[in-house]
Image (tube, rainbow, N blue to C red):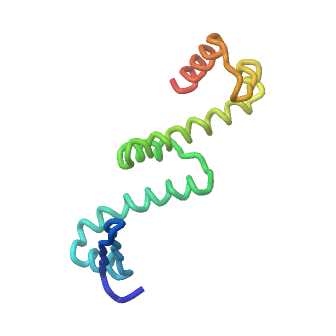
Amino acid sequence: MSDDLLSAKAGVSKDGANAELVIGEKLPSVIARLFPGRWAKAQPTFAITNRIVEKIKTGEPPDTADVQFAAAVFAEPAAKWVRCQQIAARAGRLAEQPEMSGLLPPIQPAHSPSSEAEESDRRRLADAFLG
């Protein structure tokens, strides 16, 4: 990488236009010196976001604080995905408990249709679990 803080390339051809923006390694430190207050305020957000991303990469389920942060900071689809990961982890822990084995419906292949009664049971269980 060059010593440039920022470089841009653009081109137009019969196939369309393209552009490339390259941010140099020194740009973040320059921004930090120019706007120290803003940079300091952004650091906790960066750190928490990186923590959540690491959890996602390692397969560790997000905790309640992660879900709340994601709902406040991430785009809606990403926040919803983080929440779904937490729900899936809770459901997995719940299903592993011996006293729950009789309450849960048997696992069916994805291609077989479920009855309305089974769907109602799943909704009731999800409501009880999440509520």
At x 67%, y 18%, the residue is: 114
**Above-or-below relation of 118 to 60:** above
Tell which of 27 and 52 is nearer to you. 27
Nearest the viewer among 25 and 112 is 112
Image quadrant holding the N terminus, namely: bottom left
Circle count: 0
- Specify the farthest residue to the top: 117
Choose top left, top right, bottom left or bottom right for residue 16: bottom left
* Residue drawn at the location 62% of the way across and 20% of the way down: 122
Question: Percent from the top left, x then y, of residue 68?
Answer: 42, 42
Q: Residue furthest bottom?
A: 3
Image coords of residue 100 (percent x, y):
72, 23
- Relative to residue 106, is residue 3 depicted above or below? below
Residue 118 x, y percent position in the rendering = 66, 15
The answer to which of 73 and 1 lies nearer the viewer is 1
| 46 lies left or right of 6 | right
Query: In which quarter of the view is residue 47 placed?
Result: bottom left
Nearer to me, 113 or 69? 113
User: Where is residue 29 drawn, in percent x and y?
Assistant: 32, 79
What residue is shown at x 28% (from left), y 75% (from top)?
32
Residue found farthest to the front: 14
Residue at the image point whose x is 76% and y is 19% from the top: 102
